[in-house]
């Protein structure tokens, strides 16, 4: 099987969630500035050495990651609240 990988946040970082994956899932993420990312878990590059961990998306100064989820089937979704109070559904099916 695939090797296990784990990470430990640096001093200025904090882990807020984690998810066990096998490599066949789709990763869904959303940022405060309205950007969404969907990709295969296998496409996420693992950084070793001083840049340990993963870099999923580069963020501009005021942007932040507001949520992520792992889809195991087409109907799985990440639901985020819009600035107008509505909901936006992010999923592999869409």
Image: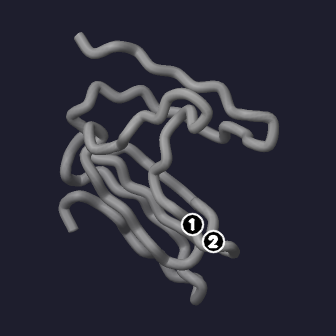
Residue tagged 1: 59
Question: What percent of the width, then of the height, locates residue 56?
Answer: 45, 51
24 horizontally vs 34: left or right:
left
In this view, the residue in front, 42 or 71, is 42
Instruction: Name the outermost residue toward the bottom.
Output: 84
Q: Given the current orientation, which residue lies at the most extreme front position?
A: 50
Q: Is mark 2 on a helix, strand or loop?
A: loop
Q: Residue 64: image x %, image y %?
A: 63, 65
Which residue is the extreme one toward the top? 1
The residue at 57%/66% (across/down) is 59
Where residue 43 appears, as percent x and y from the top left, is 27, 44
C-alpha gap between disc 1 and disc 2: 6 Å
How many neighbours does mark 1 have within 10 angstroms: few (below 14), some (14-19), or many (20 or more)?
few
Task: Identify which residue is drawn at 67% across, 37% down.
Answer: 15
| Rendered image coloring scheme | one colour
Tell me: residue 72, above or below residue 76.
above
Dot 1: element: loop
Is 45 or 40 nearer to us in this picture?
45
Image quadrant assignment for residue 37:
bottom left
Relative side of 32 to 41, left or right:
right
Residue 91 x/y as whole percent: 29, 60
Is 49 left, or right, of 26 in this rendering?
Answer: right
Q: Do the residues labelled 1 and 2 touch (CB within 8 Å)?
A: yes
**Residue displayed at 54% across by 73% down:** 81
Report the quarter where the N terminus lies.
Answer: top left
Q: Mark 2 points at which residue?
A: 63
Image quadrant where residue 92 sits? bottom left
Q: Quadrant of the C terminus?
A: bottom left
């Amino acid at each position: 099987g695939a090797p296990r990988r784990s990470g430990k946040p640096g001093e200025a970082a904090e882990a807020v969630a984690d998810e066990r994956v096998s490599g066949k899932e789709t990763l869904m993420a959303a940022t405060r500035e309205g950007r969404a990312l969907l990709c295969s878990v296998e496409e996420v590059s693992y950084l070793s050495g001083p840049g340990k961990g993963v870099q999923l998306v580069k963020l501009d100064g005021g942007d932040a990651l507001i949520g992520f989820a792992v889809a195991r089937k087409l109907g799985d979704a990440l639901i985020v609240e819009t600035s107008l109070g509505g909901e936006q559904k992010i999923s592999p099916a869409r």
